[in-house]
Amino acid sequence: MNIAFDIGGTSLRVAAVTSSGIGEPKKVPTPQDPKEAVQQIATLAKDISGGAIEAAAGGIRGRVVDGVFLKDKILVQWEGTKLVDELSQALGAPVQLVHDTAVAGLGEVHYGAGRGSKICAYITVSTGVGGDRIVDGHVDHYTYNPEIGRQLIDGTELEGLISGTAVQKKFGVHPKDLDSLDERNKLAGILAIGLYHATLHWSPDTIVLGGSMIIGVNPIPLARVQEELTKRITMYPKAPVVKMAELGDSAGLYGGVALLQERR
């Protein structure tokens, strides 16, 4: 049996790959100790599979280069962990591991809102802001993970302007409690500037937006984002289509399925 997994800063998920996609995911809190996390994933995977695992694939928050987890502000103790090797040894199977927004984007392109897109930019707006590009159904290649949330708008990082963390800091309320449409439209305008830059750099035909600031309560209005982006894209015949992600928390698991299909 093949296994899909998704390692977030708060929770990790593991699911069996089935003929129709994925089985019921198993979800547990993400341990701060990476060795504990590896064993947790192995235990869940072997429980789901009955012990026989052919291959596994998934994503993780943070940056992994040549199989090694780099410095991260949430998974602090994970720095330097040879994560791919350790997961492979624990599972007794080959492991593919990519950036969390890359695997979520891959899931959306194959199974969700990005279906039919040749060049899709998947961007999540949640606690932070991140994104990746999916080209012809595959994760694009980079020297390091893209950091779209770190782009500067009037000297401030995009993440520091529209993320859930930024909203809570500015307004003193949880983003789901920001019921002012006027303020959320302002966030849409700022996000549109970020997407304008992404469009010039990545030239996508579709932009899929996910994350709690997009699909949660009192979200950033997508219609306004599309309107503001279209106003700015004057150098191309048309602006990319902006869509809301469809797969929610399961996007990374479905992306793991897509990665495993590439092995065949």
Image (cartoon, rainbow, N blue to C red):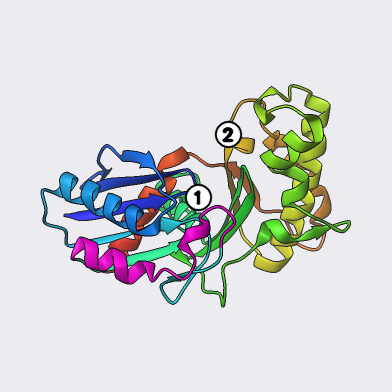
- In the rendered image, residue 234, in percent from the top left (x then y), is placed at 82, 58
Q: Which residues are magenta?
A: 72-92
Earlier-in-chain disc, 2 versus 1: 1
User: Is 14 displayed left or right of 29 in the figure?
Assistant: left
Q: Amino acid at mark 1?
A: Gly
Q: Is residue 183 magenta?
A: no
Nearer to the camera, 92 or 232: 92
Tell me the mark number nearer the camera, choosing from 2 and 1.
2
Q: Which residue is mark 1?
A: 114
Q: Which quarter of the rendering shows the C terminus?
A: bottom left
Q: Residues within 10 Å of mark 2 (few under 14, many from 20)?
A: many
The residue to which callout 2 is attached is 215
At 52% from the left and 55% from the top, the residue drawn is 101
Residue 161 image point, x, y percent: 78, 46
**Distance CA(mark 2)–CA(mark 1):** 15 Å
Badge count? 2
Amino acid type indicated by mark 2:
Ile
Judge left or right: residue 123 versus residue 137: right
The secondary element bearing badge 2 is classed as helix
Label 1 packing within 10 angstroms: few (<14), some (14-19), many (20+): many
Q: Is residue 178 among the parts visible in the rendering? A: yes
Q: Quadrant of the N terminus?
A: bottom left
For image coordinates 59% across by 56% down, the residue present is 73
